[in-house]
Amino acid sequence: MSAFKPLVFSGVQPTGNLHLGNYLGAIRKFVALQETHDCIYCVVDLHSLTAQLVHDDLEDQTRQITAAYLAAGIDPAKHIVFNQSRVPGHAELAWIFNCVARIGWMSRMTQFKDKAGKDRENASLGLLAYPSLMAADILLYRATHVPVGDDQKQHLELTRDIAQKFNNDFSDRIAARNLGVTMQVGEEKVQGYFPMAEPLIGGPATRIMSLRDGSKKMSKSDPSDLSRINLTDDADTISKKIRKAKTDPEALPSAVEGLEGRPEADNLVGIYAGLADTTREAVLAEYGGQQFSVFKPALADLAVEKLAPIAAEMRRILDDRAYVDAVLRDGGERAGKLAEATMKDVRGIIGLSQG
C-alpha cells in the first residue's frame, strides 16, 4: 500500500436536541464532504454515557441524530450512517488505545478539565478516557480526514499521538505482515498501520454562541430554550428566537474589526454568514451601519429559509421509525465489516490469540 485511502469519519452525540451550532459546525460540513469523499457518519451513543449514564430515551435521541443527518442531505446508500454501539470494534480498539495512551496525555485534555471541574476525583473513568474512544472511532476505519470543531481539535491531536505511538511500537510487526504505509517520523521511516488523520476546520461559523450570551457556546444543556435554535423548531419559533436574541445598542460596523468586544453582534453576523455560505466581510458590506432592527428580520428570514425545510423533513423521517432503524442496521453491518478487517490486523500485530 503506497498511501492510505482518503476517508472521512465524524460523529455526533445523541444528547438532547440538535441545534443550529451542530448544523453549521458539523452536519452541513458532512453533507458537503460526501460529494468529494467516501464518508462514515456515526451517532456516537457510547460517548453519550460519559455525560449521562442513565438515559430515559437514548434510542429515540439516536434516531433524532440519524434523522437530522438524512434530512440535511446525507445519502445513507452511498455512504455509511450508523450508531457506534452496533460495532463492537469501537470498544475493543478503545481498550487497546487505553493501553497505548499515557495518563499524562489524558489529564491534559482541556475538555476533561472543564467537564470534571474541581471535583476531578469524582469524575468517571469514562470521561477521562473519552479521547481514547474518539481515537478508536476514527482509526477503526483508518480515516484520513475528520471534520471537527475547534473544541475537538485537541482530541484529534491526541488521536494522532496514539496512532504514532502504535505505529512506532509495532513498526517491525506491521512491516513483517506487509501492512500499512511507509511513513516519515522525524529522521526515521516506520511502517505505520494507522494514518495521521487531518482535521477539517474552517468556514465562517465554526463556533456558534448562545443567543442569550455571546460569550458562551450554544448548548443543548442550556436551561433557556431561547439560547439556541433547535433543528426541530418551526418557522415561527425560529423567528421569535432571533427577534429576542441579545444584542447591543450600536449599529453593525462596516468592517470585521468593529465586531471585537461585541460578542452578540459577532455571533449573529457569523450565523448569517454561515447560513448564507458567505463571509463576515460580505455580510457587513451589505448591513454595515444598519441597526439590529433591520438586520434581525433579514437574519430570521434567512434562518427560516434554510432551517425550516430541514425541520419539516426531520419530522417526516422520524414518523417512519422502521426506516430510521433500517438505515442504522444497514450502516452498522457495513461499518462492522470494515471494522472487523481492521481489528483482525490489530489483533495479529499485537499478538492476541484469534483461535
Image (cartoon, rainbow, N blue to C red):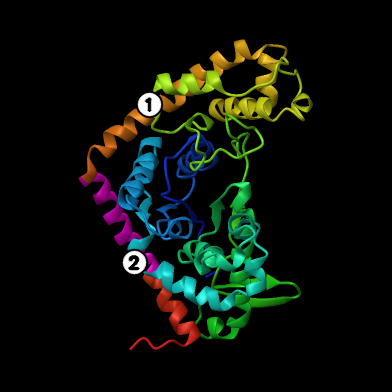
Q: Amino acid at mark 1?
A: Pro
- The disc at residue 309 is 1
**Residue depicted at 49% across the width and 84% down the height:** 350
Residue 34 location (% of width, % of height): 45, 45
Q: Is residue 9 above or below residue 204?
A: below
Residues rendered magenta in the picture:
322-339
Chief SS of the magenta region: helix
Indicate which label's residue lies in the foreground, 2 or 1: 1
Mark 1: secondary structure = helix
Magenta stretch: residue 20 in it?
A: no
**Residue depicted at 41% across the width and 21% down the height:** 235
**Which is nearer the N-term, disc 2 or disc 1?**
1
Q: Quadrant of residue 71?
A: top left
Q: Is the C-beta separation of discs 2 and 1 under 8 Å?
A: no
Q: Is residue 127 above or below residue 319?
A: below
**Residue depicted at 64% across the width and 25% down the height:** 269
Instruction: Judge the density around disc 1: few (<14), some (14-19), many (≥20) Cα neighbours within 10 Å.
Output: some
Q: Amino acid at mark 2?
A: Lys
Q: Nearer the viewer, residue 198 or 312?
A: 312
Magenta stretch: residue 334 in it?
A: yes
Instruction: Judge the density around disc 2: few (<14), some (14-19), many (≥20) Cα neighbours within 10 Å.
Output: few
Tell me the residue that label 2 is attached to: 337
Q: Spatial distance from mark 2 to mark 1, Cα to Cα?
A: 35 Å
Mark 2: secondary structure = helix
Can residue 182 be seen from the camera position used here? yes
